[in-house]
Image (cartoon, grey):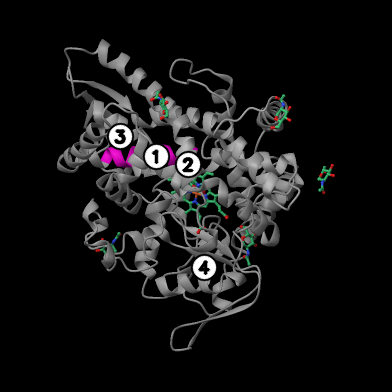
Amino acid sequence: MALLELCLAFLAIGFLIYKWSTATFNTFEERNLYFEKPYPFVGNMGASAMQKASFQKQITEFYNRTRRHKVVGLFNLRTPMIQLNDPQLIKKICVKDFEYFPNHQQFISPNERLINDMVNVMRDQRWRHMRSTLTPVFTAAKMRSMFTLMNESFSECMQHLDTYSKTSSGKKGFEVDMKGLCKKLSNDVIATTAFGLKVNSFDDPKNEFHEIGQTLVFSQGLPFFKFMLCLSAPRLFNFLKLKIFDSGKVDYFVRLVVEAIRYREEHNITRPDMIQLLMEAKKESEDNWTDDEIVAQCFIFFFAAFENNSNLICTTTYELLQNPEIQERLYEEVKETQEALNGGTLNYDTVQKMTYMDMVISESLRKWTLAAAADRLCSKDYTLTDDEGNKLFEFKVGDNVSIPICGLHWDERYFPEPRKFDPERFSEERKGELVPYTYLPFGVGPRSCIANRYALMQVKGFLYNLLLSYKIEASARTTKDLWESARGFNVTPSSGFWMQLVPRKE
Ligand code: HEM
Ligand SMILES: *[C@@H]1O[C@H](CO)[C@@H](O)[C@H](O)[C@H]1NC(C)=O
Ligand SMILES: *[C@@H]1O[C@H](CO)[C@@H](O)[C@H](O)[C@H]1NC(C)=O
Ligand SMILES: *[C@@H]1O[C@H](CO)[C@@H](O)[C@H](O)[C@H]1NC(C)=O
Ligand SMILES: *[C@@H]1O[C@H](CO)[C@@H](O)[C@H](O)[C@H]1NC(C)=O
Ligand SMILES: *[C@@H]1O[C@H](CO)[C@@H](O)[C@H](O)[C@H]1NC(C)=O
Ligand SMILES: *[C@@H]1O[C@H](CO)[C@@H](O)[C@H](O)[C@H]1NC(C)=O
């Protein structure tokens, strides 16, 4: 008897869970929008949720199958998203009628310190004020002085490689995991440019900043698991009073910044980093930002810079080793740049002048889109029409919008032969052929990436240093097919980004 009751209870629970996992799945039928059949729990994201494909591949293939519809319904796990497949409509929603879609999708739990103070999470007026406070922080002039902090981390990285190079003399170079190397570099660059702290993770990989910072990178380990739980079951997450990040670790970073601010105010110290720029911005702003609100902006670097900047270096070096002619041409440019400097150190303006470097990075950002999709949240009811005035869709308050960036980047109507790595797409002569609103590596409109200059400066500056000293070649462990072997939100092969570095000079 008891056994029967137990079985019935299990069945009932199973049924409820199934109901919950599919509860949103009639949304698009009701609203008369084209969609593909979703599966329980995973929606249309089966392959990436089950770790069978990267998020990029999943989004690209979904876009490829549905692109004949300008607007389609997508189930991102259980969340219904309205995906815009047409560049003109993207312009309309993200730029022209931005006031109807001024925020990002809201998913983070409300009991998280700092997260809700980050500019990318802020909403409406509060976002508007913080964004205009931060805009002067990321200008070219400010980046110019920040570059002088980055270049020290570059040379520490090069010194580290140098020691490998010496121990492997006689052989044809040495093998490195580019991802591991770039993570250390990113860590040191974030420490010095955002938190005012000089560390060297190459000589001292166990430094406190690195150890604690690693626990905050949400694309890996426990934070990733909690983040996914928060995404898929936010109410359960809040009910259990869970937090994505350990509050002791968060406190460490808050103390770091707050103490630095106090110390600098007392001792009149200036240093061209984020803390300094935020102190200035705060003074000039009419808003009375709290300490937490200021610290939160430094915190963004962990989410936005850490993975993205290292991934961009990895995908670019991966393409360079597969395309030796492109690498050779880039090396020529780097060599000429060094000669023009006449023994001086690399600076921001010289980095900006490397045009072929810019073409290579632009193409790398196209082919290996780091942010697979951007999102918007509808905050006022809105009727979407096409150019002829035909109604396409009625948006309601609370609707989530998705912009399939990597789908557009791999659409052969906009980028012929999308699998080919071809920096010439971005040459002076051919740049004009780009269809507006199809190339969106940093997003689009007033809510686009605030720090694209910072990211490009770091990646170009590092590549300059790397290419001057080494030729990048494939090693035995180099991934053959990155597109097929990448998993998760990063285009990173599970085995790592192994490559061979061959010294240019003996
Ligand atoms: C290669 C590196 C990077 C890429 C590809 C990238 C890409 C993006 C994308 C696609 C968005 C969303 C834009 C949209 O919704 O239209 C975004 C937003 C943002 N990014 Fe980045 N990003 C990078 C590096 C950084 C760095 C280093 C920071 C450091 C502070 C940063 C800070 C932000 C912020 C604050 C936002 C939100 C802006 C807002 O909501 O007003 N990003 N980024
Ligand atoms: C898109 O679909 C077409 C036809 O099915 C296929 O030939 C093409 O390779 C696909 N593109 C991508 C990027 O998957
Ligand atoms: C970094 O740049 C600054 C300013 O140009 C220069 O004084 C310094 O020597 C450079 N440091 C390294 C390690 O190249
Ligand atoms: C800092 O500078 C201000 C004015 O620039 C000056 O009044 C103050 O005495 C200085 N403080 C210290 C500790 O040097
Ligand atoms: C700003 O906030 C701080 C602390 O909350 C308060 O002490 C100060 O008086 C405020 N200043 C203005 C101008 O509102
Ligand atoms: C890259 O940056 C964007 C926006 O700042 C962020 O949403 C995304 O999670 C980052 N990607 C990774 C892999 O960290
Ligand atoms: C939009 O996304 C958020 C976060 O995933 C979700 O909580 C909300 O229910 C979604 N809105 C709609 C209308 O589905």
**Depth-wise, is mark 3 or mark 1 nearer the camera?**
1
Q: Read off the residue under disc 1.
A: 348
Which residues are the magenta region? 306-318
User: Looking at the image, do the residues carrying marks 3 and 4 touch, with CB atoms under 8 Å apart?
Assistant: no
Disc 4 marks which amino acid? Cys
- Say which of 485 and 120 sits in front: 120
Counting every numbered tag in the picture gives: 4
Q: CA distance from mark 3 to mark 2?
A: 17 Å
Q: CA distance from mark 4 to mark 1?
A: 31 Å
**Residue 143: assigned label:** 2
Disc 2 marks which amino acid? Met
Q: Position of residue 355 (x, y in %)?
A: 27, 48
For the residue with label 1, is its CB less than 8 Å from the closest atom of ligand 3? no
In the visual, does 458 lie left or right of 240? left
**Depth-wise, is mark 3 or mark 2 nearer the camera?**
2
Q: Position of residue 61 (x, y in %)?
A: 36, 60
Q: Read off the residue under disc 3.
A: 464
User: Looking at the image, do the residues carrying marks 1 and 2 touch, with CB atoms under 8 Å apart?
Assistant: yes
How crowded is the residue under tag 1: few (<14 C-alpha within 10 Å), some, or many (20+)?
A: some
Q: Position of residue 221 (x, y in %)?
A: 54, 34
